[in-house]
Amino acid sequence: MLISRAYARKLGLIINRDLENRLDVEFADGSSDWTSGVVHDVAWRVGGRTVRCDFQVLDDPCVDVILSKDYLFGLDVFSENHESFFDTELNEKLYQLCNIRLIGRYSPALNVAEEQYLEDVISPDAFGPEMMQRELARRDRLVANY
């Protein structure tokens, strides 16, 4: 979950700028940027549901808020609240909204898991039973380690 620094200030949110709260993020085009901190325990409301969230603060994203896939799909936000979303003309900055990932915050084990996942997903049997079991085992290992 990301929020622009300007929007966080507009909402009166307190940005925790401690170094341990700054994260290196990579965008789909391969570029990267550091967040400038985090805002904790924000009451975020879409439709009739309010969820308490932490948002990483990015200085100059192309939109005010970027919601995580876990939030969007875990809470069925798109299907239940489609009227809360709108189309915008972002042109060349659209990459900022897709496939944002953390860099270097977690152990090398996460990088290995990511590499294994990428190998598995392009294999001819990517969605076969064996690959599904490998993915579930990989997720279990990651959850146990973090």
Image (spheres, helix red, strand yellow):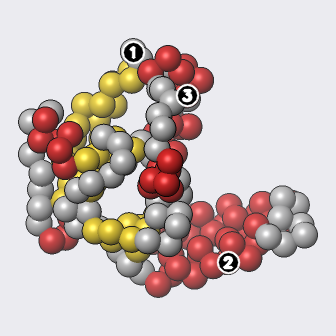
Q: Nearer the viewer, residue 9 or 23?
A: 9
Rendered image quadrant of residue 16: bottom left
Q: Which residue is mark 1?
A: 48
State left or right for residue 7 relative to residue 53.
left
Going from N to C along the chain, the mark reached first, 3 or 2, is 3
Please tell me whether residue 94 is drawn above or below residue 118 in the rendered image. above
State left or right for residue 57 relative to residue 9.
right
Measure how far apart labels 1 and 2 are at the Cα level: 39 Å
Q: For the residue marked with disc 3, what is the amino acid?
A: Phe
Q: Residue at 59% x, 74% y: name it.
A: 114
Q: Which class describes the residues within 10 Å of circle 2: few (<14), some (14-19), or many (20+)?
A: some
- Label 3: element kind: helix
Residue 86 percent location from the top left of the image: 48, 26
Q: Which residue is mark 3?
A: 78
The reply to whether dot 3 and dot 2 touch (C-beta < 8 Å) is no
Residue 72 percent location from the top left of the image: 50, 37
- Label 1: element kind: loop
Q: For the residue marked with disc 2, what is the amino acid?
A: Gln
Q: For the residue marked with disc 1, what is the amino acid?
A: Gly
Q: Residue at 51% x, 30% y: name it.
A: 87
Q: Which residue is mark 2?
A: 116
Measure how far apart labels 3 and 2 are at the Cα level: 30 Å
Of discs 3 and 1, which sits in the foreground?
3
Quadrant placement of the C terminus: bottom left
The number of callouts visible is: 3
Going from N to C along the chain, the mark reached first, 1 or 2, is 1
Q: Which class describes the residues within 10 Å of circle 1: few (<14), some (14-19), or many (20+)?
A: few
Please tell me whether residue 37 is drawn above or below residue 9 in the rendered image. below
Going from N to C along the chain, the mark reached first, 3 or 1, is 1
State left or right for residue 34 relative to residue 26.
left
Q: Is residue 13 visible?
A: no
